[in-house]
Image (cartoon, rainbow, N blue to C red):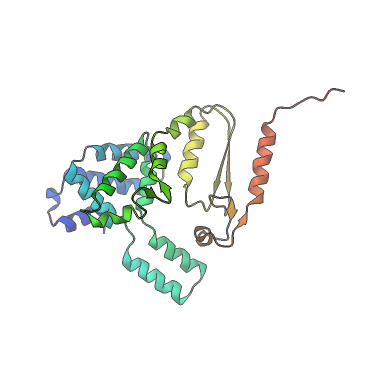
Amino acid sequence: MSASAFLRRLFGRANGEIHQQTQRLVSLCETLLSEHGEITGVALAREALACYQTLGEREREEFFDVLAKTFSPSPDAVGQAADAYRADPIPENLIRLQESAESLRPELFRRLNAAPGATAALVEMRRLILKGIAAHPQWKPFWYDEPEHQYGRHIRYYQQLQRLDVEGAWHKVAVPTLIVWGEYDWIMGRDESDRAAAIVRRAAPVTYLVRPGMNHHFFKYRDEGAAFAEKDGTFDAQAATQIAAWIRSQAPTTTTRP
């Protein structure tokens, strides 16, 4: 069921009676999730956040309901994948189970965060969601940690992050740069590294190293499922070797006196 169809079912209204701005924002989010181009993705993220800022209280409640329901894993799909893995616990079935249990919300927030100034807007969005959980228990999946923590970190971390202009910092880089990304990095997507490389290349040379099988912590795994579970990983020594070689290549050449 699409998010737009869910809105009609949730509120029992004809399409024309649903708040127009809510429909537009949901449509922008669906498009953003299906978009693969870097420039188009940033433009869509900027437009979606601008649309969100225009919502009134009722429209925001509608939007949060859609995020909580439609952008959550399908119970039927998770159940079927779990049954398949229980019957045959092979890596392929584990990957399908993990993929079916993943929510689209983190990916949506990650893509929205590509827009300039997005971090502040997303932190404020989470504040409103946390404030409204008591009246809207269906929003609970947004915030699974303690009241002042999320993803194991204190809210002060996100407040400090909100004040940073990471993309602006990349625009100031004017020296040779090494960017390293692991194929199985499920914490930071490829888009972030691609974006950083594209920005820095405007002013300086970039060496972009993509390590096969490596996760966020420089460990290699046999497949995505093992990387997600962080099971049986080994340190990617070759990545360390390549990084050290790049650093040495950037060192100034010195002449030894006879």
Residue at the limit of the structure toward the top, as seen here: 257
How many marks do you count on the picture? 0
Q: Looking at the rendering, in which quadrant would you find the N terminus?
A: bottom left
Residue at image position (20%, 42%) is 21
Residue 34 can be seen in this image: no
Q: Is residue 115 above or below residue 213?
A: above
Occupied quadrant, residue 42: top left
Residue 176: x, y in percent? 59, 31
Residue 53: x, y in percent? 25, 37
In-image side of 254 versus 92 (left or right)? right
Q: Looking at the rendering, in which quadrant would you find the C terminus?
A: top right
Residue at the limit of the structure toward the bottom, as seen here: 87
Residue at image position (15%, 49%) is 18
In-image side of 193 versus 80 (left or right)? right
Viewer-side residue, 134 vs 191: 134
Residue 38 can be seen in this image: yes
Viewer-side residue, 122 vs 77: 122
Occupied quadrant, residue 233: bottom right
Viewer-side residue, 159 vs 13: 159
Residue 127: x, y in percent? 29, 44
Residue 22: x, y in percent? 21, 45
